[in-house]
Image (cartoon, rainbow, N blue to C red):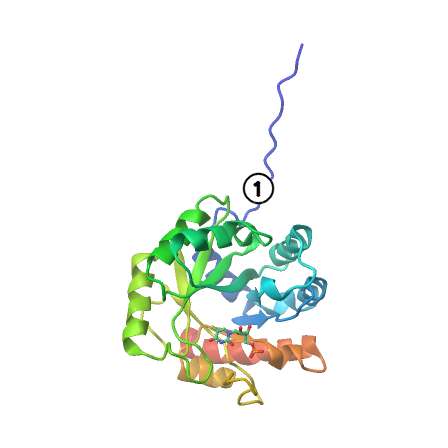
Amino acid sequence: MQLPTLKIEIEDKNISIPIRQRFQTIIKEKKSNLCLSADLTSLDEIIELSNLIGKNICMLKIHCDILTDFSMDKIQELKDVSRRLNFLLLEDRKFADIGNTVALQYTKGLFQIAEWADLVTVHVLPGEGIVQALEQAAQTINESRGCLLIAQMSSKGALTNNEDYVNGVIKCAEKYSDFVIGFISQSRLTTSDKYLHCTPGVHLTNTGDQLGQQYVTPRQAIDGRGADIVIVGRAILDSINRVKTAEAYQQECYQVYEELHLS
Ligand code: 5FU
């Protein structure tokens, strides 16, 4: 007699939780609103670093197209670390093409971003079809996915510093509010706490770099500019002790955030 096959489903408890809710829970549980921008060219090094710093961050942001050793196996390893140490993975892809193309860029090619990135960044420059396409593509994935719309950039002379443009981005966020969970911004764009405002261009000691990056301090970003999440790259990566520096940024960022939002 043939025995019936047992179908065992090993379910990741995070799969079914909407990404917005998961993000907010992580921030509160870990007392961290720090996103590490791991702009390193080795995925092995990013995995090693995230094992050390993962406990201090709510999100890890990468640029997969600068990696010299990308593989789906390694990115799965990073995903495993992110689940174990409870932070989200953001691919800062800055999608900016027509809907059909971005759907392919999101799901296909070498990187298959939709398979592993909880969140991606998106320019609304081509019109709302870009978000519609990504949202549709994300529905083919068996995990909750979302995106951050790039509303304002931190670099000198950014053409995003235009009221009409930013208003268009906000409208798009409202229309696709399930998939759009927040903004990359340099100011508070809406009073709704539905959208997480994520602010790059943060450094405690430098005011900029030689290529147009402009920095503010964590306090200026959170208090002055209404950031919920602070994105920090070289301030941590170039420091002598990355772990200690990440801890210091975590403490400073969350303290200011608590003063403003949770007191
Ligand atoms: F959308 C943006 C922006 O407006 N400014 C940015 O700096 C994104 N970034 C990213 O944040 C940029 O691509 C880097 O990955 C990171 C900032 O790194 P830094 O080392 O803290 O300057």
> Where, quadrant-wise, is the N terminus in this rendering?
top right
Q: Where is residue 11 drawn, in percent x and y?
A: 57, 41
Residue found at x 46% / y 80%: 154
Secondary structure at numbered mark 1 = loop
Residue 237 in percent (x, y) is at: 65, 77
Residue corresponding to mark 1: 11
Q: Identify the residue at image location x=54%, y=87%.
A: 208
Can see residue 178? no
Q: Nearer the viewer, residue 173 or 108?
A: 108
Say if residue 156 shows up in the picture: yes
> In this view of the protein, which residue sits in the foreground, 172 or 84?
172
- Residue in the image at 62% along x and 55% along y: 79
In the figure, 83 relative to 212: above or below? above
Q: Quadrant of residue 224?
A: bottom left
Instruction: State how many labels appear.
Output: 1
Q: Is residue 247 above or below residue 102?
A: below
- The furthest residue to the top: 1
Of the pair 160 and 232, the residue shown nearer to us: 160
- Whether 76 is drawn above or below 184: the answer is above
Residue located at (48% from left, 51% from top): 104
Q: Quadrant of residue 4?
A: top right
Identified by mark 1, the residue type is Glu
Where, quadrant-wise, is the C terminus in this rendering?
bottom left
Q: In this rendering, would 240 be left or right of 249?
A: right
Vertical order, 1 against 92 (above or below): above
